Amino acid sequence: MIQLIGIPGMPEIGPGDDLAAQTLDALIAAGERLHAGDVVVFTSKVVSKAEGRLVMLESITPSSFAIEWAAQFGKDPRHVEVVLRETRRIVRMDHGVLVAETRHGFVCANAGVDASNARVDGELILLPEDSDASARRLRATLAHAAAFAPDALAVVISDTFGRPWRGGQTNIAIGAAGVPALLRYRGQSDPAGHTLRATSIAVIDEIAAAAELVMGKLDRVPVALVRGYDYPRFGPDEEDTGAAELVRQAGRDLFR
Amino acid sequence: MIQLIGIPGMPEIGPGDDLAAQTLDALIAAGERLHAGDVVVFTSKVVSKAEGRLVMLESITPSSFAIEWAAQFGKDPRHVEVVLRETRRIVRMDHGVLVAETRHGFVCANAGVDASNARVDGELILLPEDSDASARRLRATLAHAAAFAPDALAVVISDTFGRPWRGGQTNIAIGAAGVPALLRYRGQSDPAGHTLRATSIAVIDEIAAAAELVMGKLDRVPVALVRGYDYPRFGPDEEDTGAAELVRQAGRDLFR
């Protein structure tokens, strides 16, 4: 059995705050504690706030391209400018929505730039600079503070993405540490002995999706535990490739 | 807290089998029982088997188009023919993979036709004819057999889909009953009072993804419970639109 546990009572997080310490405090206040094997899931928002990945609109001078496009859809050109600065490639630009490939290689609306859940008016929240590195840092800090072995925990950083050909959005993983992005069944056999079709399950995305069920968007639950999931551990010679592995795999993507 | 509980010990299911009764038997054998509010998640495979959505390759005469394309990639033309018969529109056809829109409106590899986990060699498993109707039937039968009120349970039918711009596959919902496909936050405010960007979370996809973590591909765990998720209930005048709602929403999809 797997348990999904939202951690209530997290304080508002700002630049420089020790997110790992705040998480452990909130856990204790909730009468919980970390268990070895837990996957700790953070929303990208709370990670970005702790890392200071914040921009005030008033500090931005929009380009003429940003002004032009913003005017067509009644948007703030400074907001559009910030989106463009976070964009490596524009994938679609229509109906007032900008689907962008970020520098990380993620494809999402507005390059992940968002004003919701900002601390003050006029503040925009960007995605973490390197969300796999953020996950690795959080993992090391949490394991140390909990007096666990360095590899006793895993961390996933989640964000809310739309997807082509399907309505609604789901939480997916933009960062991971300690848990493989993909569980590969390729070449293995089902119970009846048939070789499975090429199948690699993006388990970190499923972990992020599961955690969203106890997080919600309106409540202040930016951290959740996935407990009891027996994910494969990395061997001593294996590289922890994080969520970037899913971007790499997408390069071979037939859907592109 | 939400619990994800895989139901072990399900027997091999075949056409005409009472999937709801077999599920309840396996639950009892595992020392479990249904709780009011449980979401019961079935893989599409086990639903298709119970509904007899099975085709033997030896019964298929391939078209010349199927023969032509199969020859290029060393595939069985009869298998390709079955895929084409389940296809409304071919979205991509390259590198030996056929991405198809099914009659339901789902976009997936091979129109959901698959040989893995088949009962015998040469058998292909198709998607359920109408997976929302299958979910509604299973929901009614389970609630009745468990002596619950008809609306005490929800059912989700899951399948494993790839997605554009991202590596790996995840489980998503192709059928649902009793739980809304989308949780809408549009126009609502975050704790600080900012209006959230247009956000509707495809919770049935997140439920399917969460359940996959206790199902796995190689083990015979085609049913799981998601327990403790406080999903919104339909009002007396609301229509249960099932997973088809996500197809409908995809019609307004900027990514298309």
Image (cartoon, coloured by chain):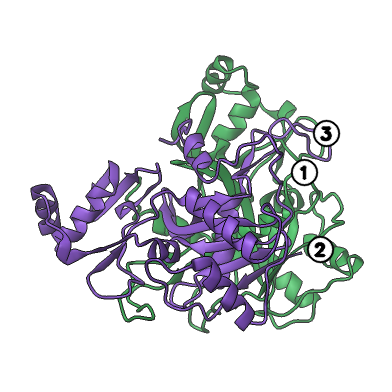
Chain colours: A purple, B green
Q: Hey, which quadrant is residue B76 in on the image?
A: top right
Q: Amino acid at mark 1?
A: Leu
**Foreground of the two, A44 or A236:** A236
Q: Is residue A35 above or below residue A162?
A: below
Q: Is residue B18 above or below residue A244?
A: below
The quadrant in which residue A51 appears is bottom left
The residue wearing badge 2 is: B23
- Mark 3 belongs to which amino acid? Gly
Subunit ID for the residue under disc 2: B
Element marked by disc 1: loop
| Comparing labels 2 and 3, the label whose residue is closer to the camera | 3
Whole-angstrom CA distance, mark 1 to mark 3, is: 10 Å
Q: Position of residue A1 (x, y in %)?
A: 76, 64
Residue lying at 79% horizontally and 38% vertically, measured from the top left: A190
Residue ID at (74%, 47%): B52
Residue A95 in view here: no
Which of the numbered marks, if any, corresponds to residue A193? Answer: 3
* Viewer-side residue, A236 vs A207: A236
Q: Residues within 10 Å of mark 2 (few under 14, many from 20)?
A: many
Within 10 Å of the Cα at label 1, are there few (<14), some (14-19), or many (20+) other Cα atoms? some
Q: Which residue is mark 1?
A: B218
Residue B86, given in percent of the width and then of the height, sits at: 56, 39
Name the kind of residue labelled 2 in the image. Thr
Q: CA distance from mark 2 to mark 3?
A: 24 Å
Report the side of A200 relative to B118 (left or right): left
